[in-house]
Amino acid sequence: MASLGASLMDGYGPTKDRCYQLARKHLEVCEREEDGVNLMSIEALQACILITYYELRGKGFARAWMSLGRAIRLAQMMGLDRMDADLRSNDAPKFQPTLPAARSSLELEERRKTFWVLFIIDAYASVRSGNAVAIDQAKVTTALPCPQPIPEPSQPPMPSLNNAKALYGTSYLSSFTGLVLMVSLYRRCSTHVELSLDNESAGSGSVYSFWEHHYSIDKDVKACGDALIGTKDAQALVQDEVTLALSLNLSAIDIRLHEAAIVKADKDGLPKALITECNSRCGEAGMRIAEKVSLSQKLVQAKKTVFRQMNMYCVWPVCMAMQVLDRQLSSVTENAQLEHSVGALKLLVTGIEDLEDVSGHWMDSISHIVKRLEQMDSTDTKTSEFSV
């Protein structure tokens, strides 16, 4: 925690590195102990997760990837992904969790929230690496995080991820739970894309209901957005930096889903109207992201600081929007629309710079777009200032 805190403040570089080295050293001491008592504790897992998060914010992704795998295995050994399984069903763990029984509802909720933080980080690592997630959400039975530190006596039990829609429209849908649901949708979308590709490589003997899953995910993304964002206007979003970040990511999922649909429709020779519609959906989502980036620049003081601390989760949507809007520039025929699109792209470049991507990974992925925008400037291509 000290290392993460120091990393967010100017002038604390040596302190940051020293705290990080001490954290790794103490965790390695726990790993080397013969009986493993200190390693098999929620505190050791939390330390491992914090180390992973710290490493993901830097340039050494390989190191972070290894730390993440260690944290996930440790959590699974503790049974944190199967906490609320019905012991009489097939969902019950095949082995007894190594953690002792929780002494209070507060300790039980701490374990759940620790797992869900890891669930979120696993998805980010998947986005960054292009590899599949390590946690199989279809097997997760742990209840969703409670909006309070401990459940209130009058509060009904939190549902599992599979029954999350029961929270829509209730006061129990916290920002933390919203992050979990957004990540779950990203995972479903990624699995959908992977299965469709696997089906094509397997040939006609394997059938995957692409469009059935496409429309199901599309419907759930909209329902999740309605539940988490609802009718919040620009003024309300400027006061809620977490919901702003959620909105960015939901729009990016929308892009990923419809880009896969474009490829599928084109490959199967489906009507051009379907491809046009999917292209339009991608463009609309890209513009929504640009609008949210514009709003993020109006955040002040602590809210702006918190938003920047979430940069790991915000740069991916901005890059997705840039790639879509850049591709669609070639089909723009009206000067006013061209100026608007280029203005949005420039705003998104500024947004990534404001988010301070220390890893350099995301800036590298859109460097060709930045160069093209610079070339447009050198040829005096007109652009209009993008505004919400």
Image (cartoon, rainbow, N blue to C red):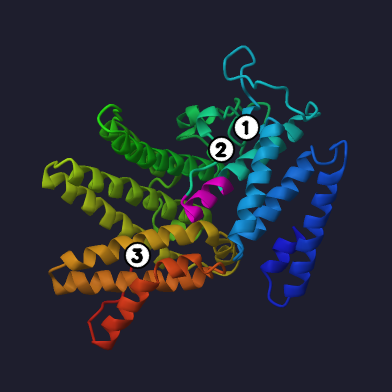
Residue 319: x %, y % from top left: 40, 62
Residue 297: x %, y % from top left: 46, 70
From the viewer's perspective, is residue 148 above or below residue 82?
A: below
Task: Name the residue carrying label 1.
Answer: 81
From the viewer's perspective, is residue 332 above or below residue 172?
A: below
Neighbourhood count class around disc 1 (C-alpha, 10 Å): few under 14, some 14–19, many 20 upward: many
Residue 135, labelled with which disc? 2
Between residue 49 and residue 202, name the one nearer to us: 202
Q: Earlier in the sequence, mark 1 or mark 3?
A: 1
Q: Residue at x 48, y 59 (%)?
A: 314
Between residue 152 and residue 268, name the one nearer to us: 268
Q: Badges 3 and 2: C-beta atoms under 8 Å apart?
A: no
Q: Amino acid at mark 3?
A: Met
Query: Does the rendering let one see residue 150?
Result: no
Task: Name the residue carrying label 3.
Answer: 322
Q: Which span of residues is magenta-colored?
A: 121-130
Looking at the rendering, in which quadrant would you find the N terminus?
A: bottom right
Q: Amino acid at mark 2?
A: Ile
Q: Earlier in the sequence, mark 3 or mark 2?
A: 2
Q: Secondary structure at mark 1?
A: helix
Q: Residue at x 25, y 51 (%)?
A: 281
Q: Badges 1 and 2: C-beta atoms under 8 Å apart?
A: yes
From the viewer's perspective, is residue 66 above or below residue 372?
A: above
Q: CA distance from mark 1 to mark 3?
A: 36 Å
Q: Residue at x 31, y 54 (%)?
A: 285
Q: CA distance from mark 3 to mark 2?
A: 29 Å
